[in-house]
Amino acid sequence: MSLVFLLHLAELKLSLSLRQDSGFLSANVGDNMTLKCFYEGDVAAMFYWYKQTLGQKPLLMCSFYKYEKNAIFHNEFKNDPRFKLEIETNGNQLKIFELQHSDAATYFCVNGLSFDFEFGDGVTLSSESYEVASPPVLVYFLSAALAFTITLVVLLASSVYETNKINSRRCTDSQARSSTASTQHVEGQDADNLHYAALSENKAHRPRRQRDNTDTVCVYSSIK
């Protein structure tokens, strides 16, 4: 049975050759992807796209007749705007928009003539996300850096507060000392005036000789 099937494939390739993108494609979640399928020959045929998830059977996505302009989507792909098929004269393009993790699979372009089917080589699509690519070490480093920055800001704020507090206290003490010194100076001047007034009063009621002594005492008191 397998041998007959291989012979049918060989005969089919003589009249209609099918080529599609093959290999391994990698894309990020949210990207758009285009899978191309080309064919040659004038034999009328039906074309299909199948999706095979790892460990699962191939699932029919869409089908269309070679000379038609619109494809019919099936199963879970029906009425899903993320999937679109563009049909050209000698090929078609399966477009997948806004890739999701569930889109990771192998996609086959297939043509069918009567009961014979020709599968393309298949293309495997792998989806990746930026979050998965971020190493845990970088996350830990950024967390530690953030904690250090917060601690440093708190320490600087505390230091500024203490400095302002000390400067305010010094300013208050300086003003207090200045006020005290000014008061003492005024009181000293008042005392000198009182002594002078007292001596002058005595000088006015004493004899001349005693007045001279009063002058001497007054000068001595002023120097002292």
Image: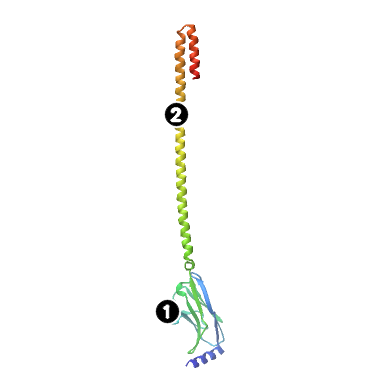
Q: Picture coordinates of residue 37 (x, y %)?
A: 54, 80
Looking at the image, tell me whether mark 2 or mark 1 is earlier in sequence order.
1
Task: Give the structural element (helix, strand or loop) at label 2.
Answer: helix
| 172 is higher (above) or lower (below) than 215 | below
Q: Picture coordinates of residue 139 (x, y %)?
A: 47, 62
Q: Quickly name the residue at label 1.
A: 75
| 192 is higher (above) or lower (below) than 206 | below
Cα distance in 3D space between marks 2 and 1:
97 Å
Task: Give the structural element (helix, strand or loop) at label 1.
Answer: helix
Figure label count: 2
Tag on residue 180?
2
Q: Nearer the viewer, residue 154 or 36?
A: 154
Q: Picture coordinates of residue 56 (x, y %)?
A: 43, 81
Q: Nearer the viewer, residue 128 or 173?
A: 173
Query: How many C-alpha atoms fall within 10 Å of the one at disc 1: few (<14), some, or many (≥20)?
Result: few
The answer, for residue 107, to whether it is visible in the render is yes
Q: Residue at x 47, y 45 (%)?
A: 160
Q: Picture coordinates of residue 1 (x, y %)?
A: 47, 93
Q: Residue at x 48, y 61 (%)?
A: 141
